[in-house]
Amino acid sequence: MIFRKPNLLRAATALAIVLGFMTGPSVSSAAAEELRMLSGFSPNFAWYREIGPKFINLVKEKTGGETTIAFNGPDTVPTFEQLEPLQAGVFDLLFTHPAYHSGTTAIGLAIDAIAVDPTKRREIGVFDYIDKHYQKLGVKLLSTPSTGTKGFRYYLREPISGEMGLKGRIIRGTVSYHPMIKALGGSPLNMPVSDVYTALQRGTVDGAAWGLTGAADLKWYEIIEYMANPRFGQVGVMIFMNLDKWNSLAPKTQEALLSAGKQLELDSLAYFDKLQVEEYDFLLKKGMKLTSFSDKETAEFERLWAEGVWEVATDKSGDDAKALRKLAKDAGMTR
């Protein structure tokens, strides 16, 4: 693995912070172990709140209480800087969206262009392909839970009028969205979600591309009025583990972690589909309104999204991304 020195310094600093706040032994016996998990999402945010604790509890259950997990949020290490501390072994686990480390690899974010079917993804080899890719970076993939059958929509300060639907607007979005935002006439701006509320409030951005859950937690309904149809794509967050740490675990612990990750994928899909409906109703009650892209643009949304994600993945990860796309396309799971 190759790291830039400034990032190694940040990783070492983060480790010092973590160790500094430990006030007692992290294990209760020689057999027990507490793993340190870094999260790109705060503990009260829907994606972590509805996935992170479930994974922690599943691991504890499946290891008979021998393995526990301690949470560390983005206040410890900023969201877009979290992969390298994991690679360096500062943290044992990382819960994130792979778009947040797309400067290193874009293979993970490509899962957002692959149909949500956890079982089939594993059967055709998508999970194993992504896992093997990340292992070259010193990281082990444990789980790819989805936040619902559908993933995203645009949240806007002003309603859509005509084509192109985002013409002249600055839209917050991670790199996965950039080709689609441009195709719809907008100008993409990458920023952490923690900065979006203020940017929307001040008019620095005219809208945000975001998931179908989480906008309520972020309280965007206080400052903007519109949710745009159609919904599109899918969200695949991921749980990774430092590879050296993984290799140091007993086989039964490894099996428990993988079993927890697999169950999490199945449980999360149905749960988030329900949660999306509840959030939609909540936002309407808070005064948000629907606005829609034209029929012509709506018909193109899934194509624009999938091709945009693959464009980003291929630009960064080349032949590895092309091979993953072929694997998924041959199975009818992507465009």
Image (cartoon, rainbow, N blue to C red):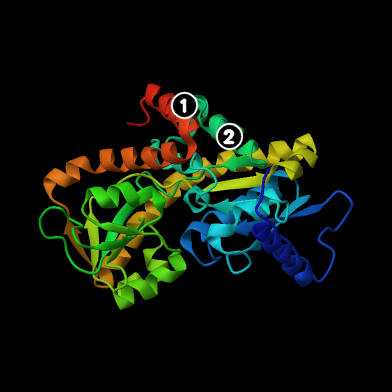
Secondary structure at badge 2 equals helix
Q: Residues within 10 Å of mark 1 (few under 14, many from 20)?
A: few
Above or below, 44 relative to 187: below
Residue 135 as seen in the image, left or right of residue 150? right
Q: Earlier in the sequence, mark 2 or mark 1?
A: 2
Q: Quadrant of residue 20?
A: bottom right
Q: Is residue 30 visible?
A: yes
Relative to the observer, which residue lies in front, 281 or 15?
Answer: 15
Q: Residues within 10 Å of mark 2 (few under 14, many from 20)?
A: some
Q: Is residue 40 visible?
A: no
In this view, the residue farthest toward the right is: 30
Mark 2 vs mark 1, CA separation in Å: 11 Å
- At 24% from the left and 72% from the top, the residue drawn is 287
Above or below, 114 relative to 88: above
Residue 86 as seen in the image, left or right of residue 181? right
Above or below, 201 relative to 175: below
Secondary structure at badge 1 equals helix
Relative to the observer, which residue lies in front, 5 or 285?
Answer: 5
Residue underneath mark 2? 133
- At 76% from the left and 36% from the top, the residue drawn is 252
- Tags 2 and 1 touching, CB below 8 Å: no
Q: Quadrant of residue 243?
A: top right
In this view, the residue farthest toward the left is: 162
Relative to the observer, which residue lies in front, 85 or 61?
Answer: 85
Residue underneath mark 1? 323
Residue 133 x %, y % = 58, 34
